[in-house]
Image (cartoon, rainbow, N blue to C red):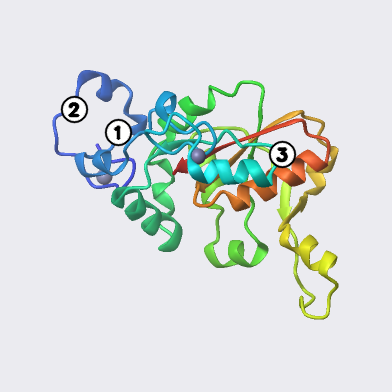
Amino acid sequence: MKCSSCHREIVENLTLLELFFPSNIRCFHCQEQFKRIVWEQACPGCGRKNNPALCSDCQKWQKQSSFLLNNRALFEYSDGFQEWIEFFKFKGDYQRRFAFSTELKEALSAYPHYTICPLPLSEERFGDRGFNQVSACLDAAGVTYFPLLKRKRHDTPQAGKKREERLQLQQPFEMAPDGKKMRASKVLLVDDVYTTGRTLFHAADCLLENGFTTVKSLTFAR
Ligand SMILES: [Zn+2]
Ligand SMILES: [Zn+2]
């Protein structure tokens, strides 16, 4: 049996259960790569581990923004996770999209009435990489999602623009054609890593301005 992340043959002993449900079995090395965050003990704003009160980063966001994302993250951004993302996203090892399908699907079951929306890449990025790393993992987990957003095209240089126009440009997203037609109220944004949260806040802002009432987010790591 092959590991769902690195595809090496698994030599460790498998339990009977794993033999009957082999969809998402990782080798010992890859199992160690992914460290789950316990949601009940995480920051209610960004999903940071072992931080049950709002963390200092989220307190800053609270002053700037009228909402919080209630982000939840599956895994710690550990060396192991970094290794996975390096192979998958930057070296283009597309097979790694199956690495945590079971955990992803299970986590999304906590959002039954939400429309799932992966963060889009710019056309340029998409062209370079050949796949959207978030959609690829959702596909691997058999999850239905809707591309409500798209990246704006920045073809005019920023210099020479008025201040208000420049501020507008900081918003990298706009509604995708399908997003404009969609009348869902609750959206769950999905991204790979929560770093500063800025990109997710922009995406949520765009949706809230376009009539969606609740926007939360889920990331693979924090
Ligand atoms: Zn492995
Ligand atoms: Zn936080």
Taking depth in this image into account, of 179 and 165 the one nearest to the observer is 165
Q: Residue 164's quadrant in the figure?
A: bottom right
* Residue identifier under label 1: 25
Q: Is residue 88 visible?
A: yes
* Upstream in sequence: badge 2 or badge 1: 2
For mark 1, give the secondary structure.
loop
* Upstream in sequence: badge 1 or badge 3: 1
Residue 159 image label: none
Mark 1 residue type: Ile
Number of marks in the image? 3
Q: Residue at x 21, y 19 (%)?
A: 16
| Percent x, y of residue 141 | 49, 34
For residue 87, above or below residue 197: below
Contact, CB < 8 Å: mark 2 with mark 1? yes
Mark 2 residue type: Leu
Q: Residue 45's quadrant in the figure?
A: top right
Mark 3 residue type: Ser
Estimate the spatial distance between the alpha carbons at disc 1 and disc 3, rounded to whole Å: 41 Å
| Percent x, y of residue 189 | 62, 39
* Upstream in sequence: badge 3 or badge 2: 2
Contact, CB < 8 Å: mark 1 with mark 3? no
Residue 66 image label: 3
